[in-house]
Image: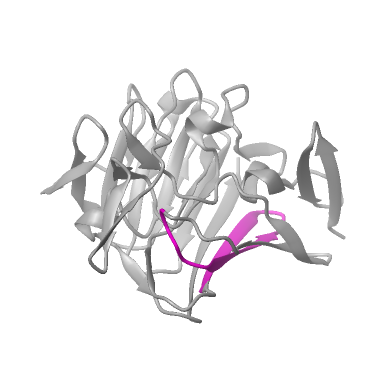
Amino acid sequence: MFRIDKKTVRGVEFIELRSSDSSTKLCLCLNKGGSVDKLKIKNRTIITNLHPIPFNKCYPSSILFPFVNRIKDGVYNFKNKKYQFYCNEKSANNAIHGLVYNKYFHCSREKLTNKYASIKLCYEEVKINDSFPFYYRVELNYKLTRKSLELRVKIINTGEEKFPFTVGWHPYFKSYELSQSNLLFSTNKKLLSDSKKITIKVEDCNLKMPFSLKNKTLDEAYILNDNTVEFSTSKYDLKLSSSQNENYLQLYTPKDFDAIAIEPMTGISDSFNNKIGLKELSPKKSFEITWSLDVIPK
């Protein structure tokens, strides 16, 4: 039987789902947007929180909503009205990673069986924010089995007006030896960015697969041809799948850390302005996307 434990560390609340032998564990942080703090499968660390790097430096496993990546100068227009997000990336004067990464998500449902544990975490915006003056609810449904993790994100427009959005996920995967790890994905389009990491152009590319991470420092984005990305390390192989047909991928390697951010997204940087991947959600309607991780330990 899977188990669930709850703990508070220095005022920060965590929920841990784990298998009966504790070889598989999922730790979630309620105060940090319901994000994954750690994922261990068969005693292999799969997702890491990059400790001791501060959370607001790398945003590990954050849910990115209502926008992914960055918005140039935090400025966008919607329905002929100009809005200004707070620029939390001070060095480049960008708004980065949305509005819910630091929100408190409450637990609304738990289920434990012999084969899996699942949990539903929720956040509802009930106060008008001048930068994004819309009401919404975000539901995160996590399902953990002994060799997989499923994250289903549901966005609900609870207000009376349509709003623009993209959504993404920012997990960092532990590689143990990054130089001996590689990726496998299908793309022929790369997104070029300026010095402030704002998309300026889409260009053709022809990447050799598998894509070796040896001597690579990455902060790159691609348009995917399908819905899967594979990651191979010395300790495990992983397949990341999306339920959507239109998918974008951000790859980022933090300095001096054997990990890589493999970020599935429905849009790109500055999507509120360049409109690439941008969606609109009508009142009382919802949008769902599921990201699945299937792990094969070595």
Q: Position of residue 100 (x, y in %)?
A: 54, 51
Q: Who's the residue at 38% across and 47% down the image?
A: 85
> Is residue 19 visible to us here?
yes
Query: In which quadrant of the rendered image does the C terminus lie?
Result: top right
Q: Position of residue 7 (x, y in %)?
A: 85, 42
> Is residue 40 visible to us here?
no
Query: Which residue is nearer to you in this view: 55 or 251?
Result: 55
Magenta-colored segment: predominant secondary structure: strand
How is the structure coloured here?
A: one colour
Query: Which residue is nearer to you in this view: 58 or 298?
Result: 58
Which quadrant of the view contains residue 54? top right
Q: Position of residue 81 (x, y in %)?
A: 27, 62
Which quadrant of the view contains residue 176? top right
State left or right for residue 161 relative to residue 13.
left
Residue 116 drawn above or below residue 43? below
Looking at the rendering, the stretch of residues picked out in magenta corresponds to 131-156
Q: Position of residue 204 (x, y in %)?
A: 12, 49
State left or right for residue 293 relative to residue 82.
right
Residue lying farthest to the bottom in this orientation: 284
Q: Who's the residue at 26% across and 69% down the image?
A: 79
Residue 276 drawn above or below residue 295? below
Q: Who's the residue at 23% across and 55% down the image?
A: 273
State left or right for residue 100 relative to residue 198.
right
Is 205 inside the magenta-drawn segment? no
Query: Which residue is nearer to you in this view: 92 or 79?
Result: 79
Query: In which quadrant of the rendered image does the N terminus lie?
Result: bottom right
Residue lying farthest to the top in this orientation: 256
Residue 148 drawn above or below residue 251? below
